[in-house]
Amino acid sequence: MQSTAISFSPSISLPKKPHKPSGSASLCRFNPLSQPLRFGSLNGSTARKINPISCSADSSSSKLNRNGWISVPAPVPERESDGVEVRATSVPESAGEAPKSKPLTETLVLGSLFGLWYLFNIYFNIYNKQVLKAFPYPVTVTLAQFAVGSVLVILMWTLNLYKRPKISGAQLVAILPLAAVHTLGNLFTNMSLGKVSVSFTHTIKAMEPFFSVVLSAMFLGEFPTLWVLSSLLPIVGGVGLASMTEASFNWAGFWSAMASNLTNQSRNVLSKKFMVRKEESLDNITLFSIITIMSFFLLAPYAFFTEGVKFTPAYLEAAGLNVNQLYTRSLIAALCFHAYQQVSYMILQRVSPVTHSVGNCVKRVVVIVTSVLFFRTPVSPINGLGTGIALAGVFLYSRVKRIKSKAKTE
């Protein structure tokens, strides 16, 4: 629907507030006997005719009378005109809103962020798997990734690329449980990647919605609907089918991936339970940055006591490893590890959690497919079917959550 705007030419400035005129004043009214006005559109359509406004000077009138006369100050003399020409122009309802190019730009930015999210995730899983295969010390590898992330966060704050937050002691105490489960989640993921194939690890991690529903019901009192429970059945069944036919299956890798699901979803539940009131001033990126630094300090003592200092050039050379290659791959994996999580939070600030969940499902499919192609992982038909059923269940779960979210807002 469009609205009509009226423009007057030539323009006559009227005072904002009525005042008593001094001297002569100009009296204006519609004169049905005078020459009609032209009323047309800006695009040159056929003009319509209305009665013009005629003006005369009269010093005796100072206010609106019953005959429709209006007393206004005499305008500055201008060129003579047959009347006031009134034009109608078509103005869309979106007038005054942002240009049409802005939504297009936002869409391109969001699409680019999703592309980077997937790309960084692919590179992280490939290089991380190569490092863990040559250097089977997941605690040290995880610590190195937190160290690189901490350096990037400090540089980001130092160079004012992102506002450095002011954190109180009470806030740090509230964040500590989140940092602990974040540390365990990434550690268990690396432990699983070191034991089984990348595709199988991510197939097991497709069970995250199952743990999310269970933990939300236990600690938040959010009980799932029948549709949500129905969407979990293909996830559990698909993961079970894929596990029975996985060539690289072992229990250590399986339970590590399951523990990663548990700790990662515990982090989300803790965020809802403890951070709503205390951390309203912290955005997702700032919270992630603080958690990264805290995770490094939490994991460092455990890494030194359990695995020792084994990332030195002397130790790696003694183990017969290519030092430069291992360091390069470890650095790329660590950079991609921090980058994909940072981009993930940037996307979460632009879309709803349900949309982000759907994107995460697609990301898992992309990672599984690319890892199978890159590492030439043997996949049996039943194994592929189980993986497909599990991922389809995750997508169905995301759709059900979206419908539930829309119902709440209506």
Image (cartoon, rainbow, N blue to C red):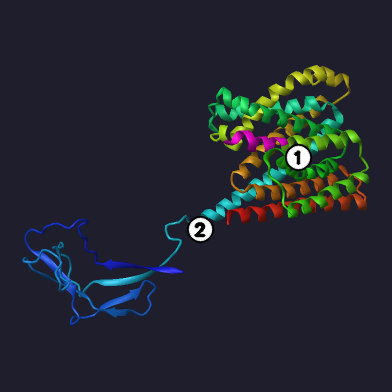
Number of numbered discs overlaid on the protein picture = 2
Q: Residue furthest bottom?
A: 33
320 or 239: nearer the viewer: 239
Image coordinates for residue 153, horizontal then vertical, percent: 62, 29
Assess whether residue 268 is covered by the magenta stretch: yes
Marks 2 and 1 in Cβ contact (< 8 Å): no
Image coordinates for residue 303, horizontal then vertical, percent: 78, 21
Element under disc 1 = helix
Q: Which residue is mark 2?
A: 100
Q: CA distance from mark 2 to mark 1?
A: 35 Å
- Quadrant for residue 79, please give it: bottom left
393 or 371: nearer the viewer: 393
Left or right: residue 338 versus residue 84 is right
N-term-proximal mark, 2 vs 1: 2
Residue at x-position 13% and y-position 64%: 63
Tell me which segment is drawn in magenta. 266-276
Left or right: residue 105 versus residue 249 is left
* Visible residue check, residue 132: yes
410 or 292: nearer the viewer: 410
- Quadrant for residue 341, please give it: top right
Tell me the amino acid under the disc marked 2.
Answer: Lys
Q: Which residue is mark 1?
A: 123
Look at the picture and state if 91 lies above or below 46: above
> Which secondary structure dominates the residues rendered in magenta?
helix
- Quadrant for residue 326, please give it: top right
Residue at x-position 73% and y-position 20%: 300
Image coordinates for residue 311, horizontal then vertical, percent: 79, 21
Q: Is disc 1 surrounded by few (<14), some (14 to 19) or many (20+) residues within 10 Å?
A: many
Residue at x-position 52% and y-position 56%: 101
Left or right: residue 2 versus residue 404 is left
